[in-house]
Structure formats: C-alpha cells, structure tokens
C-alpha cells in the first residue's frame, strides 16, 4: 500500500511537470509572437513537442519510440534557443553543441528503432548515450545562463533579473543529471512499477528532478510581480521601467 501511495505521489509530480512545461511552452509562443522574437517561439515549440511526446507515450500508449522523436525535437529546440539567446552574433562553440546534440539524438532514434522493429536489446547502450545527451543540452543552458548572470551581477539593474538567470542555471544543471537513475531501472520492468521498489525509486527521482526544473524555469520566465518585489526589496529603484523581453536579452549579450 505504501508503495502504491508513493507511486501516485510521483505520478502527480510528473503530471505537474508536464502541465508546467505546457504552460511555459505556450507562454513563450505568445511572448515570441507578440515581440517577434524567434528564440522564444523556438523554445515554446520545443517544450510543447516534449509534452506531446510524454502524453503520447504515457497516456495514449504510443510507445517510447514516439516519445523519443518529440524529445529529440524538444532537445534540439532548447539548444537552438540557448544559442540564439546567449550567443547571437558571436562566434562560439554554440554550433558544435548543436551538431553534437543532433548526432546523439539521431543515434538514440536509430537505437530505439532497432529495439522496436528488430527486437534488439539496446537498453543500456541507449541509457549510456542518453546521459551525455541530456547533460549536454541542459548543462549547456545552465552554463550559458550562469555566464549571463556573471555579466550582469555587478550592474545596477533590478535584482529579480539577476535571479532569473541564476535560477535557470540552477534548475538546468540539476535536470542535466536526470537520466542517471535510468541505469538502475530493472530491464523488463515497467518504469515506475509500484511492485518494484527500484523501479519506483527511479521513477520518483526522475519525477522530483523534473518538477524542480519545471517550477524553477516557469518562475524564472513568468515571475509574478509579488516575487519581483520580494527580490527588489532592498534595491533603490532608479526608475520603474518595465523591461521588454528583447531588452532583457540585450542585457546579457
């Protein structure tokens, strides 16, 4: 009974992650269209693509191959967003990161195809590649966001803006390790099986890490006014200007 309760707690957390991802995805799409900012549109589409993959796999039982296709689209979109947001107009390693991401994602799709259509057991190979794949995408975002924070930390701008980039760096760094628990998933056991403690622990760890990212990322980009005021409580406002998203992006480039 205790394991079943834990399963539903973790399932609720995973649902919260998916809902948060969908909400922030539509937020980026709307903001991007309003401000004609392609980077926001790209990440909005990426988040929505990942949600489609998760729902298709877990709700409609379309399988992990279906999910992997949309995760691939989402991961590539996240890297493109990171490159457009933090490295626009600058020569950097950004293109290399994008190329490596596409290569790793393509290999994952091939391995998944071999498993689904040819019954070849590629689980541990896929997991082994999935770790650097996920680590690269989210650690690249974490590093880029932290570097942006370093650029503005001594500038006389509202503290909530600095918190945004610290928060994105923190939650992205945490999520970059989210695939490591998959090493411990028992082969042949349903992911999150409440009758298997190890599988449930893997499911729970992934759910907790995912929801931390979703909430933190959502707060960073959709920060409510009361929270902005909290972070600005000791700040002497030189003006009460409301920055547009484009102006905030220009601060970190």
Image (cartoon, rainbow, N blue to C red):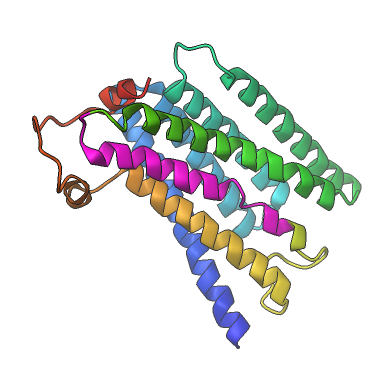
Can you name the residue that lies furthest to the bottom here?
Answer: 1
Q: Position of residue 95 (x, y in %)?
A: 60, 18
Q: Name the quadrant containing residue 188.
A: bottom right
Q: Position of residue 21 (x, y in %)?
A: 45, 48
- Out of 239 and 128, give the one closest to the viewer: 239
Q: In this rendering, would 131 be left or right of 240?
A: right
Q: Quadrant of the C terminus?
A: top left
Q: Quadrant of the N terminus?
A: bottom right
Q: Position of residue 238 (x, y in %)?
A: 9, 30
Q: Which residues are magenta?
A: 156-182
Q: Position of residue 112 (x, y in %)?
A: 79, 44
Judge whether residue 23 is colored magenta.
no
Q: In this rendering, would 142 be left or right of 56?
A: left
Q: Name the quadrant containing residue 88.
A: top left
Q: Residue at x 59, y 45 (%)?
A: 176
Q: Is residue 155 above or below residue 168?
A: above
Dominant secondary structure of the residues highlighted in magenta in the image? helix
Q: How many dots with numbers?
A: 0
Judge whether residue 175 is colored magenta.
yes
């Amino acid at each position: 009974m205790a394991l079943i309760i834990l399963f539903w707690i973790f399932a609720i957390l995973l649902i919260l992650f998916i809902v948060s991802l969908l909400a922030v995805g539509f937020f980026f799409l709307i903001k991007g269209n309003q401000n004609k900012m392609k980077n926001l549109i790209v990440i909005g589409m990426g988040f929505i693509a990942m949600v489609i993959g998760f729902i298709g796999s877990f709700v409609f039982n379309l399988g992990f191959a279906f999910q992997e296709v949309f995760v691939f689209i989402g991961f590539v979109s996240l890297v493109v967003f990171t490159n457009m947001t933090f490295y626009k107009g600058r020569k950097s390693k950004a293109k290399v990161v994008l190329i490596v991401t596409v290569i790793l994602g393509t290999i994952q799709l091939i391995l998944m195809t071999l498993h689904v259509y040819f019954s070849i057991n590629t689980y541990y190979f896929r997991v082994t590649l999935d770790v650097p794949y996920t680590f690269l995408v989210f650690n690249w975002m974490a590093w880029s966001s932290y570097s942006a924070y370093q650029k503005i930390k001594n500038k006389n701008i509202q503290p909530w803006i600095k918190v945004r980039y610290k928060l994105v760096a923190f939650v992205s760094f945490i999520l970059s390790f989210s695939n490591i628990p998959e090493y411990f998933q028992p082969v042949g056991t349903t992911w999150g099986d409440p009758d298997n403690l190890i599988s449930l622990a893997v499911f729970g760890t992934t759910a907790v890490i995912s929801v931390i990212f979703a909430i933190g990322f959502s707060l960073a980009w959709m920060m409510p006014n009361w929270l902005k005021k909290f972070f600005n409580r000791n700040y002497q406002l030189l003006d009460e200007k409301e920055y547009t998203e484009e102006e905030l992006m220009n601060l970190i480039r």
